[in-house]
Amino acid sequence: MGESGGSAERMAQALAARGDHTAAAWAAGAEGERRVAAALATLPDDFLVLHDRLLMPGVTESNLDHLVVGPTGVLLVDAKNWSGQVTEYRGTLFQHFWDASGRRAHQPRTRELDRLRWMADEVASRLGHGVTQAICLAGRDAHRFGPPRVVRDVWVVPLPHLATWARTVQRCPEQDLTTLKVEARTEFPSTTTDPMLLAAMGRALEQRATPAQRRRPVRRPVRRPAPTAPLTRRQRGDARRAAQRARTRLRLRRSAAGLLVAAGVWAATSGGAAAEWVVGLLGA
């Protein structure tokens, strides 16, 4: 259901028209989504497969690549057409590829895993049903990852294993799948839905949100001071002497201020000659 890769393809065309170099990455993403959609099309008829759906219609343009509802529950599948090989290392994913200069590069993909978990939590909250989240590796070297496995609570499934994984990942408890399929269609509409309808859905979604959800605090990064090298003995001595001179100057300024105040009081009570002396002292 829906056009797989449609929103990514439209973004690629818009960027290409502006001469933006990131258009190629969006086009590759759209191609990856189409490959995943073709694999999901082989699932039995009791699976509902939705493509390119809006996560929060009328609120943000974040989209769900593929949402599947069937005997194995609700599956959220995010297509990643990454170049090069993808491996698991120290509890996260790394993409290994050759950069523009011809050097071997290694990029962690932790952010993509965490974002997919957040999206799955949102889907589960709206449907009132558990969600199994998966990244589907759709690149040419996807098969080199090996069998599907869980990384940071996210299934990582190479494209050749996707259809089998979706049919056997886990059996869903008895439930009314018909109702769940209807809710999935209505809660997460296609990205091509009429804008006026999306706006109305966005208003309804905002009204349904709790006050805490509407006022989610912004988590600001903690800024720590940069580490500094230890001072040498000479630098520590210079710092102590500079501090001593600053304390001496402060005492002298305080003493001078006290003398001027005392002189002003004496001048006010002792007549004109004393006043003239204070004026001359202040003007010196």
Image (cartoon, grey):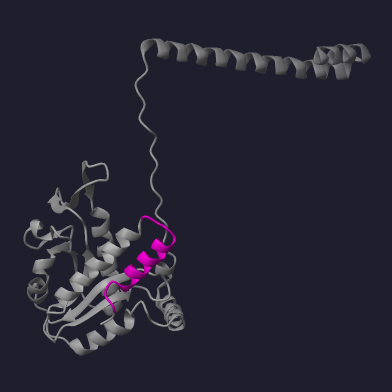
To which quarter of the image does residue 184 belong? bottom left
Quadrant of the rendered image containing residue 200: bottom left
Quarter of the image that includes the N terminus:
bottom left
Where residue 5 sits in the image (x, y, percent)? 28, 71
Q: Is residue 216 above or below residue 227?
A: below
The percent position of residue 169, horizontal first and vertical second, equals 9, 72
Using the rendered image of the protein, determine whether residue 184 is visible from the camera's viewpoint: yes
Q: Return the residue nearer the eye: 231 or 199.
A: 199
Magenta-drawn stretch, dominant element (helix, strand or loop):
helix
Assess whether residue 14 is covered by the magenta stretch: yes
Q: Who's the residue at 9% across and 71% down the image?
A: 165
Pinpoint residue 251: horizontal percent, then vertical percent.
Answer: 61, 15
Residue sitting nearer the eye, 205 or 20:
20
| Residue appearing at x 37%, y 73% in the figure | 56
Residue 131 appears in the figure: no
What residue is drawn where x is 86% and y is 11%?
Answer: 277
Q: Eyeballing the image, is 271 above or below 165?
A: above
Q: Which residue lies at the image location 84% right of the left edge and 14% below the top edge? A: 278
Horizontal side, residue 149 vs residue 24: left or right? left
Q: Nearer the viewer, residue 206 or 273?
A: 206
State the residue lying farthest toward the right: 272
127 is higher (above) or lower (below) than 257:
below
Chain part drawn in magenta: 3-21
Relative to 67, say whether 110 is above or below: above
